[in-house]
Image (cartoon, rainbow, N blue to C red):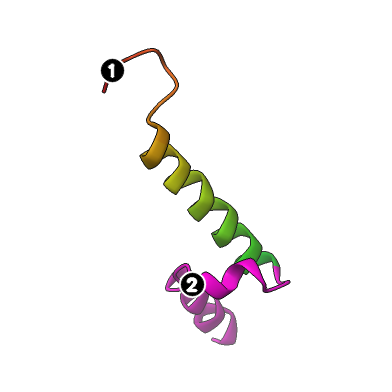
Amino acid sequence: MDQKKSKKQIAERNYEAEDYQRKDELSKGLAKTHEQATDTLKEGYNDGSNN
């Protein structure tokens, strides 16, 4: 039962600005994914289209 609870807590975790300073793997992953997503939104897709 503890493993199910742990997985649910991870699945419900969202990016927080403090993730950039945290050292755990989940926080690092969320910070990196957030950075990639915001870069894409700012720069657009790099596929040659004008979308």
* Count of residue discs: 2
Q: Which mark is residue 36?
A: none
Taking the image as shown, residue 39 lies to the left or right of residue 44, namely: right
Q: Seen from this angle, which residue lies furthest top? A: 48
Quadrant where the C terminus is found in the figure: top left
- Residue depicted at x 40% and y 27%: 45
Closer to us: 48 or 1: 48
Q: Residue 40 at what x, y percent from top left?
A: 42, 38
How many residues crowd mark 1 within 10 Å: few (<14), some (14–19), many (20+)? few
Closer to us: 7 or 12: 12
- Residue depicted at x 51% and y 45%: 36
Closer to us: 5 or 39: 39
- Residue depicted at x 61% and y 58%: 29
Question: For numbered disc 1, what is the local secondary structure?
Answer: loop
Disc 1 marks which amino acid? Asn
Taking the image as shown, residue 40 lies to the left or right of residue 21, namely: left
The magenta segment is: 1-24
Q: Which residue is mark 2?
A: 16
Question: For numbered disc 2, what is the local secondary structure?
Answer: loop
Q: Which residue is mark 1?
A: 50
Asked which quadrant contains residue 27, the reply is bottom right
- Residue depicted at x 49% and y 54%: 34
Q: CA distance from mark 2 to mark 1?
A: 31 Å
Quadrant where the N terminus is found in the figure: bottom right
